[in-house]
Amino acid sequence: MSARKPYMRQMSKTSWFMTHSRYKSYMLHEVSSLFVGLYMALLIAGLFCLGLGPEAWASFLAFVKNPLVVILSLIAFAFFIVHTVSWFQAVPQAMRIQQGEHFVPGKLIVGAHYAVLAFVSLFVLILAGVA
Amino acid sequence: MARSAKAIPWFLFAAGGTITAFVLPVMLFVTNLAPPLGLFRDALSW
């Protein structure tokens, strides 16, 4: 048996991420994946309902209108925004575009992402029936 | 420098996060928030 007694910093196993704002925002981003997974399961269930016929689709719409589901959807919406914002913030770290001697500034890359986000959102809304 | 052989898993991971970031907010609005608000009735009809 070794006589070593290495220093082990005291750290909570369940709330270590509350000790620093950077860890908190990291955890917030990671938790958003839970809601993405839940929403994906709901979307697949909705697709099956769509295939089963008008009654099944109506029951899916009724499920979506359930107050509890609406509250969960609002929370999920907030988490999706968190995911989008934090993902776009990380893009310049992963994507370095060189132009001649210099790199394209990160702000420009992030801005382009927001522009594409606006375009995609508008496109989906037009498909859904916004004038 | 040794090249990582993990490019494909990481590509899938990044692609998923990117698609999620661009598409999911508006998708959730159309499928989950529009029905209770009574929006997009034609698009959501069977």
Image: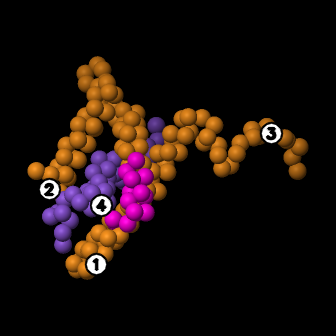
Chain colours: A orange, B purple
- The subunit letter for the residue under badge 4 reads B
Q: Main secondary structure of the magenta part?
A: helix
Is the residue A9 above or below the residue A107 in the image?
below
Q: How many labels does the image show?
A: 4
Looking at the rendered image, the disc whose residue lies closer to the viewer, 4 or 3, is 4
From the viewer's perspective, is the residue at label 4 or at label 2 nearer?
A: 4
Which range of residues does the magenta coloring cover? Answer: A64-78
Residue at the disc numbered 4: B36
Q: On the picture, is A127 further left or further right than A26?
A: left
- Chain ID at mark 3: A
Task: Report x, y in % for residue A78.
Answer: 40, 47
The amino acid sitting under disc 4 is Pro
Q: Is mark 3 on a helix, strand or loop?
A: loop
Residue denoted by label 2: A129
* Residue in the image at 32% along x and 53% along y: B24
Residue type at mark 3: give it.
Pro
Q: In the figure, residue A23 lies in which quadrant?
A: top right
Q: What residue type is labelled 1?
A: Ala
Q: Distance from label 2 to label 1 (Cα)? A: 23 Å
Q: Residue at x 26, y 74 (%)?
A: A57
